[in-house]
Image (spheres, rainbow, N blue to C red):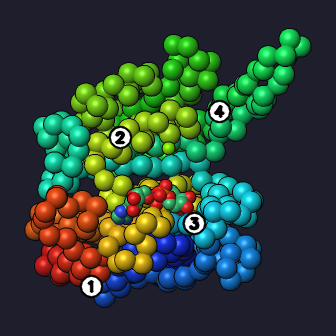
Amino acid sequence: MAANKKILVLPGDGIGPEVMGQVRRVVDWFAKHRAVGFDLNEGLCGGAALDKHGTPLTDETMADAMDADAVLFGSVGGPKWDDLPFEKKPERGLLRLRKEMDLFANLRPAVVFDPLVGASSLKPEIVQGLDLLIIRELTGGVYFGEPRGIETLPDGTKKGFDTQVYTTPEIDRVADVAFDLARKRRNKVTSVEKANVMHTGVLWRQTVTALHAAKHKDVELGHMYADNCAMQLVRWPKQFDVIVTDNLFGDMLSDCAAMLTGSLGMLPSASLGATDPTTGRRRALYEPVHGSAPDIAGKGIANPLAELMSYSMMLRYSFDLGEDADLVDRAIERVLAEGKRTADIAEPGSSKVSTSQMGDAILDALDRLG
Ligand code: NAI
Ligand code: MG
């Protein structure tokens, strides 16, 4: 790898700094043992930034994010700031990052680690070995399309309406990400829409098909209606490698897929933007799916593995360090196999480790594997 890449670390609030603390130990381990060196710059975001600067994200931190090769994010928010108006809330910091970095592709993997097969609500044979990736379009579709609103009709009844809009460039760019990432995995993309009843679905299918023919023939492509996809996810999820879909269907299907794995403390995510033509760098932010967990913050019992898996995704998808990412994932699998569990994934009555003890166990496993 070329000279040090820049990572902006934004631990945020609540358990964010607690889980990030453990990931930083792993980052140090990689610098020492694998010569994976990053320049880490830590900043404030969310409530922490509000308390210090009166805004959930300063312009300086925003500029640092734009300048970084990747952003590693914790979580923001908490009861202390709940009564603030919407524009001032800690969550605005994250929304600003997503918007200004134009992070249009949201990656949500669903991976079942063997030792946690029992945590899923599905039968072991259905989820054992599961490793799929949902890519949700994040900046377009019905959550943003115009016109939208609520109107009062002449007869006094009301009409609520939203508009699903997609353009070919919006579809192309997210599908492009899906094909590129499938190549680093099992080489299969399932494109999901409702072309049977929606015009955006027809355009989505045509556009993905054309892109595939033009640039990605080496990747296997299938199409599926969204309602069927929901069924297939719980019937036989192992048929999928990469699923690419729009904002609304992706919202629901990614939550559905997440629960195939069992625990919120085990779910990472990535949000990717466009590749800068001059630097060749793709904007990217990695974060756990969970929030700041105010109910357990400060107790030292949060599960750091979702944040750690977000780091692993960063190695894989931003820096093409697949082997190093695999090493992180194997260390996680190893400590779970050895029975180490934070409270959220522990079976009733079994012993539990703290956040930092989980970090210790991961470092120990890396020493043995690396
Ligand atoms: P949450 O994800 O923070 O917590 C939900 C439940 O899961 C809690 O019982 C919590 O203790 C548990 N949990 C979450 N992560 C865990 C971990 N790593 N280890 C062990 N247990 C874990 O969601 P909630 O309670 O809805 O939101 C709390 C705050 O976080 C709110 O202020 C919310 O706005 C914010 N939030 C921030 C997000 C972000 O920064 N991206 C995402 C979701 C919520
Ligand atoms: Mg959701």
Question: As drawn, is 238 to the left or to the right of 245?
Answer: left
**Nearer the N terminus, badge 1 or badge 2?**
1
Q: Secondary structure at mark 2?
A: helix
Name the kind of residue labelled 4 in the image: Val
Circle 2 residues within 10 Å: few <14, some 14–19, many ≥20: many
Answer with the quarter of the image where residue 153 lies: top right
Answer with the quarter of the image where residue 83 lies: bottom right
Q: Which residue is mark 2?
A: 257
Does residue 327 show up? yes
Question: As drawn, is 153 to the left or to the right of 207?
Answer: right
Q: Secondary structure at mark 3?
A: helix
> Closer to the camera: disc 1 or disc 2?
2
Quadrant where the C terminus sits is bottom left
From mark 4 to mark 2, how far is it between C-alphas?
21 Å
- Residue occupying the point 45% across, 81% down: 38
Circle 3 residues within 10 Å: few <14, some 14–19, many ≥20: few
Residue 253, image x and y in percent?
43, 36
- Residue occupying the point 53% across, 73% down: 13
From mark 1 to mark 2, how far is it between C-alphas?
35 Å
Q: Secondary structure at mark 4?
A: helix
Label at residue 79: 3
Name the kind of residue labelled 3 in the image: Pro
Label at residue 33: 1
Pick the residue in front: 245 or 153: 153
In the image, residue 310 above or below residue 198: below
Pick the residue in front: 277 or 347: 347
Q: Secondary structure at mark 1?
A: helix
Q: How many marks?
A: 4
From mark 1 to mark 3, how far is it between C-alphas?
40 Å
Name the kind of residue labelled 1 in the image: His
